[in-house]
């Protein structure tokens, strides 16, 4: 037993342990998702997050200790964003053709994402801090947190809502689009990226490279538009 | 010209250099865009201008995007640690998020499809479902 404790003390002091745990949890989650025929409810991000969080809870590991290892995975979000240029280049003819539908959907989607959250929150009588923090939830986390700070709410709360919105959208987008009988994969991907930023984009790339490309564009454009619209729309919505 | 080899390492160099250049530009020009997004634009420009890039660039980019989900796990775990921020309103918050997500997804996709139809574009371009 003491040998095990020694080993644990040694391993938990290196980034290797939690880096490996993160990747293994994802590989297992992805295998489960594949086994369940990519059923949207078995979302690999959600499954992996639950697995790793349980491990942290059981081993009484703090988040900073976990992140010392997991930061190497987190870092790759930057290069992955740059990599979006490749599918964008490949699908450029489709993207150019869809410019007007895309910009119309951007405006409608961005306003709807902000307004529906604030109106629903007021209807359900949520506290002011939460209502404000819900407004930028469809923007990518870094932008949403910046907006949160500007409008005077807790950026940590904004981050929680942003990730929850990402996972929720990634789960509901496929059944919802099938229900609406929408077969245009550019439109489906664009909606996933606009509403559920990076996590929605990851889901769209699982479905098709075309959907993923449009999701990536929507993620970028809606990040910008949300930052502009939230401070403008909030005074109207909170009247 | 740069003697690119057919290795993934060279492709990673391209992605990192684009990101670094993007971060640098964002910083010095005080641009409102995140550095990696400017890096994306730089790589897109390089592709459009047919700048010679390592042959593995496409494969490496595709590989990274194939497993984009993995990259959100650390941030997601961070969020789980902060779930107590939700407090007693947790249930109602989830209803708001679910409701707003569904409404915004439908509004976005329907607008896109309607406008595309109005413009006489065929509705079913793109691949079939998975």
Image (tube, rainbow, N blue to C red):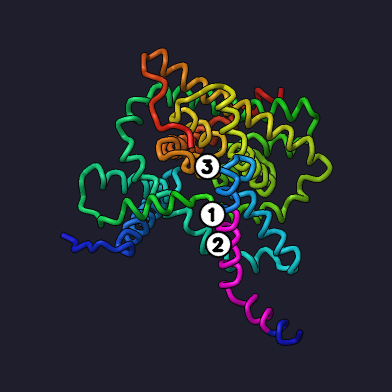
Report crowding for label 1: few under 14, some 14 to 19, many 20 or more residues within 10 A (C-alpha).
Answer: many
Name the chain under label 3.
A
Q: Estimate the spatial distance between the alpha carbons at disc 1 and disc 2, rounded to whole Å.
A: 7 Å
Numbered marks: total: 3
> Measured from the top left, where is residue A83 in percent x and y?
38, 50
Q: Does A28 lie within the magenta span?
A: yes
Report crowding for label 2: few under 14, some 14 to 19, many 20 or more residues within 10 A (C-alpha).
Answer: some
> Measured from the top left, where is residue A223 in percent x and y?
51, 38
Q: In front here: B44 or A145?
A: B44
Q: In front here: A2 or A68?
A: A2
> Measured from the top left, where is residue B74 in percent x and y?
59, 57
**Residue A172 vertical position relative to residue A182 in the rendered view, above or below:** below
The N terminus of chain A sits in image quarter? bottom right
Compare marks 3 and 2 and give the one earlier in the sequence: 2
Dominant SS of magenta comes to: helix
Q: In front here: A67 or A10?
A: A10
Q: Which residue is drawn at 39% across and 30% down?
A: B126
- Circle 2 residue: A23
Q: Estimate the spatial distance between the alpha carbons at disc 3 and disc 2, rounded to whole Å.
A: 18 Å
- Circle 3 residue: A203
**Residue B120 vertical position relative to residue A211 in the rendered view, above or below:** above
Report crowding for label 3: few under 14, some 14 to 19, many 20 or more residues within 10 A (C-alpha).
Answer: many
Q: What stretch is highlighted in magenta?
A: A7-29
Query: Is there a contact, CB below 8 Å, between mark 1 and mark 3?
Result: no
Query: Is there a contact, CB below 8 Å, between mark 1 and mark 2?
Result: yes
Name the chain under label 1.
B
Q: Is mark 2 on a helix, strand or loop?
A: helix
- Circle 1 residue: B70
Image position of B108 (left or right of B118): right
């Amino acid at each position: 037993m003491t040998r095990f404790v020694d080993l644990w003390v040694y391993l938990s002091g290196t980034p290797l342990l939690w880096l490996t745990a993160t990747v293994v949890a994802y590989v297992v989650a992805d295998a489960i998702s594949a086994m369940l025929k990519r059923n949207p409810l078995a979302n690999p991000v959600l499954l992996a997050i639950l697995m790793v969080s349980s491990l942290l809870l059981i081993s009484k590991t703090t988040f900073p200790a976990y992140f010392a290892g997991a930061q190497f995975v987190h870092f790759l979000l930057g290069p992955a964003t740059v990599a979006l240029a490749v599918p964008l280049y490949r699908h450029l003819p489709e993207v150019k053709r869809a410019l007007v539908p895309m910009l119309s959907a951007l405006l409608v989607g961005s306003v709807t994402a902000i307004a529906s959250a604030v109106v629903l929150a007021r209807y359900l009588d949520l506290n002011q801090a939460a209502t404000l923090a819900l407004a930028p939830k469809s923007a990518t986390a870094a932008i949403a947190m910046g907006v949160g700070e500007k409008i005077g709410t807790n950026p940590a709360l904004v981050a929680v809502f942003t990730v929850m919105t990402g996972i929720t959208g990634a789960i509901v987008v496929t059944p919802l689009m099938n229900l609406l009988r929408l077969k245009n994969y550019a439109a489906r991907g664009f909606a996933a990226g606009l509403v559920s930023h990076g996590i929605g984009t990851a889901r769209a790339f699982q479905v098709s490279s075309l959907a993923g490309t449009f999701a990536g564009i929507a993620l970028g454009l809606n990040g910008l538009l949300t930052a502009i619209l939230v401070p403008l729309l909030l005074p109207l919505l909170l009247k | 010209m740069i003697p690119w080899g057919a290795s993934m390492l060279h492709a990673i160099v391209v992605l990192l250099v684009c990101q670094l250049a993007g971060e640098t530009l964002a910083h010095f020009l005080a641009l409102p865009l995140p550095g990696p997004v400017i890096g994306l634009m730089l790589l897109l420009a390089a592709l459009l201008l047919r700048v010679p890039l390592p042959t593995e660039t496409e494969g490496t980019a595709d590989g990274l995007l194939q497993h984009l989900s993995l990259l959100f796990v650390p941030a997601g775990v961070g969020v789980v640690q902060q779930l107590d921020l939700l407090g007693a309103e947790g249930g109602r918050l989830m209803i708001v998020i679910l409701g707003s997500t569904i409404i915004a997804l439908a509004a976005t996709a329907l607008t896109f499809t309607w406008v595309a139809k109005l413009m006489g574009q065929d509705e079913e371009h793109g691949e079939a479902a998975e």
